[in-house]
């Protein structure tokens, strides 16, 4: 059943929230093996000094099933984060577009994504704490079912949120850059490459634009957020108790370079899949694909 809903209305935001849950949860499950490699390379950089060495060592020592450790935690945790990230982004974008009507569009994108991400990460944090331990500590637990009570018993509520600040440090700049890059890339592709509005393009072409903009946004966002990602993993695995100690242990250069290659390999496809699934859900419900085209350029295309 197709649904026509005013953009920014409660039904539209509700559909975006559901789309965010389904798209983010599915995309993160698909790339679980890459995430397992990334986490282990961050926690044990000497043992796992490259992608190939990490893969072969893990398979030899723990078997193929190790590559899917934490998949359920990722599905639920990142699904809930995705619902908040996409749904609240649309809500705040409408709100700030009205409040900051005369401001630069990038400011609206930054403010909207940051506001949504603050809430989304509070929801994600407990699941991320369990996921990282399950993936990097074979004796900790097999997944969410046994990992949740074990973490609570050993560290109480603090254990679930000890990494919240570095998680914000990773995901806030990532989300701000990712949404802004996506919006501007969509705008550029329609106005400067295709020279058409969305309504003049087929659904397949619109989804192609979504994929190109999604991969660009993911790659740029991963460069910005890599230092904080290393800090999050180090703290969750008790390699350091504070952000300062984590930075000191990792080293300034390694903070920016450790696991960067696999993060780009991981994050690019994840973000692309999220945007693709998300826009497919919107299209199936009679809604336009994501990304706004600036008003002055829309006017030019009609003249």
Image (cartoon, helix red, strand yellow):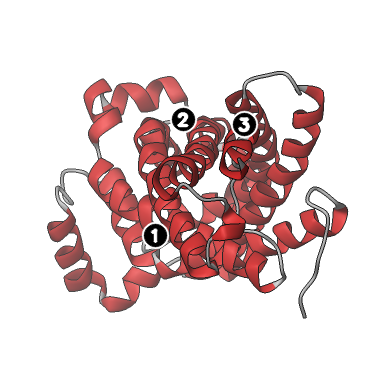
Relative to the observer, which residue lies in front, 83 or 273? 273
Q: Which residue is drawn at 26% across and 72% down?
A: 62
Question: Residue 154 placed where, x, y %?
Answer: 58, 50
On screen, residue 14 versus residue 231, left or right, reads right
Residue 167, image x, y percentages: 53, 37
In the rendered structure, which disc, 1 or 2, sits on the residue that comes first in sequence?
Answer: 1
Residue 302: image location, x then y, percent: 62, 44
Residue at mark 1: 135
Left or right placement of residue 119 versus residue 303 in this view:
right
Q: Distance between the residues labelled 3 and 1?
A: 49 Å
Q: Residues within 10 Å of mark 3 (few under 14, many from 20)?
A: few
Would residue 215 appear left or right of 18 to someone viewing this image?
A: left
Foreground residue among 300 and 14? 300
Q: Write down the residue under mark 3.
A: 296
The C terminus, quarter of image: top right
Instruction: State yes or no: discs 1 and 2 in contact (Cβ < 8 Å).
Output: no
Q: Is residue 73 visible?
A: no
Residue at 39 percent of width and 51 percent of height: 215
Mark nearest the camera among 3 and 2 is 3
The residue to which callout 2 is attached is 241
- 165 or 30: nearer the eye? 30
Q: Does dot 2 land on a helix, a strand or a loop?
A: loop
Q: Which residue lies furthest to the right in this view?
A: 10
């Amino acid at each position: 059943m197709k649904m026509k809903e005013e953009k920014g209305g409660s039904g539209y935001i509700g559909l975006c929230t559901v789309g965010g849950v389904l798209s983010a949860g599915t995309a993160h499950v698909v790339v679980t093996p890459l995430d397992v490699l990334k986490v282990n390379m961050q926690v044990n950089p000497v043992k796992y000094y490259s992608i190939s060495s990490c893969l072969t060592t893990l398979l030899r020592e723990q078997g193929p099933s190790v590559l899917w450790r934490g998949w359920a935690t990722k599905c639920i945790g990142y699904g809930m984060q995705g619902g908040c990230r996409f749904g609240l982004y649309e809500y705040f974008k409408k709100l700030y577009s009205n409040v900051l009507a005369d401001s630069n569009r990038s400011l609206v994108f930054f403010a909207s994504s940051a506001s949504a991400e603050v809430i989304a990460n509070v929801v994600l944090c407990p699941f991320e704490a369990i996921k990282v331990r399950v993936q990097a500590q074979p004796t900790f637990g097999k997944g969410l079912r046994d990992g949740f009570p074990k973490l609570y018993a050993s560290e109480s509520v603090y254990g679930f949120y000890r990494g919240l600040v570095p998680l914000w440090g990773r995901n806030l700049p990532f989300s701000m850059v990712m949404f802004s890059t996506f919006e501007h890339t969509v705008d550029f592709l329609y106005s400067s490459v295709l020279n058409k509005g969305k309504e003049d393009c087929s659904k397949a072409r619109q989804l192609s634009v979504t994929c190109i903009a999604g991969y660009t946004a993911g790659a740029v966002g991963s460069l910005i957020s890599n230092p904080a990602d290393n800090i999050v993993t180090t703290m969750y695995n008790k390699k350091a108790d504070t952000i300062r100690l984590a930075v000191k242990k990792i080293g300034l250069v390694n903070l920016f370079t450790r696991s960067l290659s696999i993060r780009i390999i991981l994050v690019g496809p994840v973000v692309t899949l999220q945007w693709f699934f998300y826009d497919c859900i919107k299209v199936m419900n009679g809604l336009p694909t994501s990304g706004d085209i600036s008003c002055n350029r829309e006017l030019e295309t009609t003249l």
